[in-house]
Image (tube, grey):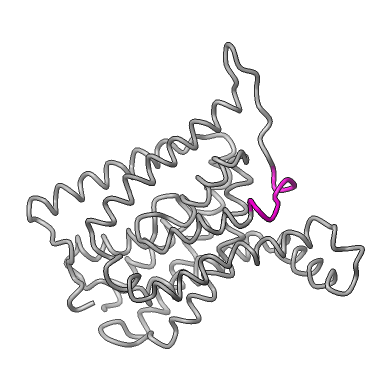
Amino acid sequence: MTWFESFVLGLVQGLTEFLPISSSAHLRLTAAFAGWHDPGAAFTAITQIGTEAAVIIYFRKDIGRIISTWARSLFNRELRHDHDAQMGWLVIVGSIPIGVLGITLKDAIEGPFRDLRLIATTLIVMGVVLGIADRLAARDEVGGRHRAIKQRKSLDDLNVRDGLLYGVCQAMALIPGVSRSGATISGGLLMGYTRESAARYSFLLAIPAVLASGAYELKDAGEGHVSWGPTIFATIIAFVVGYVVIAWFMKFISSKSFMPFVIYRILLGIVLFALVAAGTLSPHAGESAG
C-alpha cells in the first residue's frame, strides 16, 4: 500500500465511520474502484481506532462520568441506581453480541462477507430499513391531522432489553455495507428513541467493540501488502477527519432527516449491482492480493 492510498483510505474512513453508510463498505469499494488491493479487515479494524479516539474525545465528559460512576458503584450500593452507573453496565451488555459473533464469524468477515454483491445487497436493504425507521420517528415528532405528537424515549429510558437489542443491531455491522451507526440508529429509532439518543448510544456502544477489534487485529498489521507505516498514517487521518464529522453529524440529526443517507445507500447499491452485472467490476476485485 502506498502513502497516497493510505491517505485516501484514512480520509474515507474518517468521512464515513459515523454516517449511516458503512465505512467498511466504502473502504472496500474505494479500493475496488481505484484498482487497488482490498485493504482487508485488519486495516479496517485498526483505522477505526482512529475514529473511535475521536468519539472518546468528543464525548469525553460523558465517558469520564460513566466510567467513574460505574467503577464506584462496584463498591457503593447507593450508586448502582445512578443512570451513569447503569449506562456502564448497558454498554457492557450491548457489547456482548458483537464480541461473540466477531470471533465466531472471523473467517467469513475476512472472506465471503467482502463480496461486492453482498455489500450492494446490504447497502440497499439497510437503506430501506433506515428509511422506514426515520419515517416512523418523523411521524411521532410532528404528529398529524388525526395523530397526536408522540413522546419518544431518551437514554434515561434505556434498559437491559433495549441495550441488548442495540448490541444485536451493532453486530449486524460485521457485514460490510450494513453500517454500525446505521444499524444501531435504525434499531434505536424502531424501539422508539429520539434520533439524538439513538446516535449518542450508538457511538458510546461502539467504543469497546472497535477498540477490542482493533487491538485483536494488531497482530495481523504489516502482513501482506499493508505495512505498519501507511496503516498508522491512515489511522491518524481517520481521527482528524472523524472528529470533524461527528461534531457536524450530531448537529445535523438534531433537526434533519436521515433520508439523504437512505437515498445515497440505495443508489450506490444499485450502481454497484449494475457494474458487477455488466462485468465492469468483479465482485472479488482486489481480493486475491488483498
Q: Is residue 36 rendered to the left or right of residue 240?
A: left
Q: In this view, which residue lies farthest toward the top?
A: 145
The picture places residue 227, in percent across and down from the top left corner, at 33, 85
User: Residue 141 lies in magenta, yes or no?
Assistant: no
> Considering the image in quadrants, where does the N terminus appear?
bottom left
User: Residue 158 lies in magenta, yes or no?
Assistant: yes
Q: In this view, which residue lies farthest toward the left?
A: 279
> Considering the image in quadrants, where does the C terminus appear?
bottom left
Using the image as rendered, state which of residue 144 and residue 105 is in the foreground: 105
The picture places residue 178, in percent across and down from the top left corner, at 39, 54
The image quarter containing residue 232 is bottom left
The picture places residue 5, in percent across and down from the top left corner, at 28, 71
Q: Which residues are magenta?
A: 154-162
The image quarter containing residue 112 is bottom left
Residue name at image x 47 percent, y 51 percent? 183
Residue name at image x 58 percent, y 62 percent? 55
Depicted 62 relative to depicted 156: above or below: below
Residue name at image x 57 percent, y 11 percent? 145
The image quarter containing residue 282 is bottom left
Depicted 208 relative to depicted 152: above or below: below
Depicted 13 relative to depicted 37: above or below: above
Q: Is residue 88 rendered to the left or right of residue 18?
A: right
Using the image as rendered, state which of residue 238 and residue 168 is in the foreground: 168
Dominant secondary structure, magenta: helix
Residue name at image x 73 percent, y 61 percent? 61
The picture places residue 117, in percent across and down from the top left corner, at 22, 56
